[in-house]
Amino acid sequence: MFEEIECDFIHKYDLLRTLVYELVLYTMKMKPASKLSKQLINASVRIYTLLKELLECQFPIDDIYRPLTLRSASDYAKNLNIHVNHLNRVLKVSFNKTTSQLIIDRILQEAKVILRQTSWTVSEIAYALGYAEVTHFNNLFKKYLNITLTNFRKVDIV
């Protein structure tokens, strides 16, 4: 493979891709899939997995001026091409949480990380997490974590 990457052959990347594919198939042949445990994935699990992937794609927040683009349950439902009521019903029945609860949990998790690891102001954090009003974000933080943003930063909570 090292020799192939060094040559001037116009289709060398196609050749390398084929060699990698051959290597993958060879390793699969050594351990057949029938011996691996098979997992049944229903539609609810698939929807949940896709939602979590969409949610996680937005994190970590490393730029103040690039706020979250997907913030509401309807934003995620639109991206998943399903109705927001169906999304909420699936998550509530299967995982006992609504879409909004999952979103808020992840936003608060990211807020705690940002508060601990950066010197951003509270308003910068709120904006980066998609809140136009700092008071809305502060109220949300206090409602779910029973502590204000500034007090959280002062106290080292694990």
Image (spheres, rainbow, N blue to C red):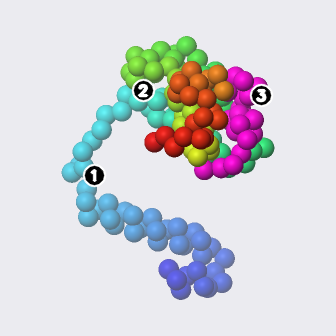
Residue at 77 percent across and 28 percent down: it is: 132
Outermost left residue? 35
Q: Is residue 118 above or below residue 93?
A: below
Label 2 crowding class (10 Å Cα cut-off): few <14, some 14-19, many 20+? few
Which marked residue is nearer to the observer: mark 2 or mark 1? 2
- Please, what is the three-letter code of the amino acid marked with disc 2? Ala
Q: Disc 2 or 3, which lies upstream in sequence?
A: 2
Q: Quadrant of residue 121?
A: top right
The numbered mark at residue 132 is 3
Label 2 sits on residue: 43
Q: Position of residue 135 (x, y in %)?
A: 72, 24
Label 3 crowding class (10 Å Cα cut-off): few <14, some 14-19, many 20+? few
Q: Is residue 18 left or right of residue 95?
A: right
Q: Is residue 68 above or below residue 76?
A: below
Q: Which residues are magenta?
A: 117-137
Residue at 57 percent across and 33 percent down: it is: 108
Q: Nearer the viewer, residue 8 or 6?
A: 6
- Mark 2 touching mark 1, by CB under 8 A? no
The numbered mark at residue 68 is none
Instruction: Look at the image and tell me whether residue 82 can be seen.
Output: no
Q: Position of residue 42 (x, y in %)?
A: 37, 28
Q: Identify the secondary structure beneath mark 1.
A: helix
Q: Position of residue 140 (x, y in %)?
A: 61, 23
Label 1 sits on residue: 33
Q: Position of residue 17 (x, y in %)?
A: 52, 67
How many discs appear? 3
Q: Is residue 19 magenta?
A: no
Instruction: Look at the image and tell me whether residue 84 can be seen.
Output: yes
Residue at 41 percent across and 67 percent down: it is: 22
Label 1 crowding class (10 Å Cα cut-off): few <14, some 14-19, many 20+? few
- Mark 1 touching mark 3, by CB under 8 A? no
Q: Is residue 119 magenta?
A: yes
